Each structure stands twice: as C-alpha cells, then as structure tokens.
Image (spheres, rainbow, N blue to C red):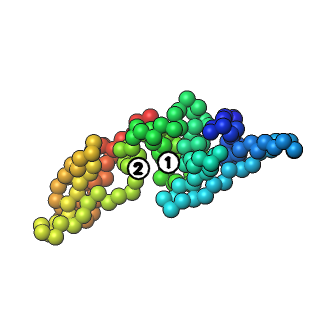
Amino acid sequence: MEVVLNEMKIKYEDGKLWKLRETKTKPSYWVELKGCVKKDGYRQVGINYKLYKYHRVVYFLHNQKWKIHDSCRNNSIDHIDQDKLNNNIENLRVVTNQQNQWNRDVKGYCFDKARGKYKARIGVDGEQKYLGYFKSEQAAGAAYLDAKGSLHQILP
C-alpha cells in the first residue's frame, strides 16, 4: 500500500517504511526510511523535512482515514506490548492520552514514613484514587494491580 504524506510517496512493506526517491536523470527507486531512535525510545523518521514518529506513520499507512497530524489528547497511538520499537500494525491502536498512560509499568504504591505503611493509589480521569494503606509491599502492589484490572481497561 502506498500513500502520499507531506508530498512524498511512502509505503510499508516487509515490516519497513520506504519512500520513493524521484530523480530527473535516473528512474525512480524506493529507499528505506530508517530514521533514528530518540532519547524517549521512539523511532523517528523525516519525510520531506518534517519529523514523524515511526509508529504513527505505520498506523496511518494502514488506516488512511486516521488523522496523522491531529495531535489532540484523544488521538494517541499505543504500543499494546509496551515495546516502543515493535511497530507492527497488530501492536498499534488509537487511544486517548490517559489510556496510553495506563499501558505503562508503574508500582502504584509507595511507603508512607509517617504511618509506617504502604500507600496504594491509582489515577483515574486525572485524579488520584486512594486504595488504602497496607502493612506489606506485596499487599499494596496486589491492591493496585486489582484496581488497574478493573479501572484501566482499553476496549477495542
């Protein structure tokens, strides 16, 4: 499948992004868009002097009605397996920014020195929901994972 993005013809084939290099003197040919991995762990590519996250381009190629330039909080692309370099289309989905945060590895608890117990909490709709205080780290972690299972569901 081929599309035009930022006035350049691109395609996704064999798990790689390609751009069409057109010249006046030789026949046109396809060049792999490798890009580079940034400090945040995401691969980034340049398409006609504009930078794009690799996973957003892959998703766009497979879903051309999706608005790749829409950077609102309801238009994030999530890596389901949390591997920022696994850009297979089966591993990508559109989510809200909040849902994208749910798919991170966090403990969900901390030690409260004043009480001498572990405090568990979880973020929901921009607010912290306190799950309670626990004598053990394992109990606080279990409470967080239980709440995460019911409150942080991303439905297809």
Q: Please state which of residues 85 and 21 is positioned toward the viewer in this rendering.
A: 21
Q: Counting other residues with Cα less than 10 Å from the Cα at mark 1, is it few (<14), some (14-19), or many (20 or more)?
A: many
Residue position marked by numbered label 2 in the rendering: 103
User: Looking at the figure, which quarter contains the C terminus?
Assistant: top left
Seen as rendered, the residue at the extreme top is 65
Q: Position of residue 99 (x, y in %)?
A: 38, 43
Q: Please state which of residues 31 and 131 is positioned toward the viewer in this rendering.
A: 31
Q: Which kind of residue does numbered mark 1 sit on? A: His
Q: Position of residue 120 (x, y in %)?
A: 23, 57
Seen as rendered, the residue at the extreme left is 115
Q: Counting other residues with Cα less than 10 Å from the Cα at mark 2, is it few (<14), some (14-19), or many (20 or more)?
A: some
Q: Position of residue 21 (x, y in %)?
A: 76, 44
Q: Are marks 2 and 1 in contact (CB under 8 Å)?
A: yes
The answer to whether residue 87 is seen in the rendering is: no
Q: Secondary structure at mark 1?
A: strand
Residue position marked by numbered label 1 in the rendering: 79
Residue appearing at x 62%, y 48% in the figure: 49
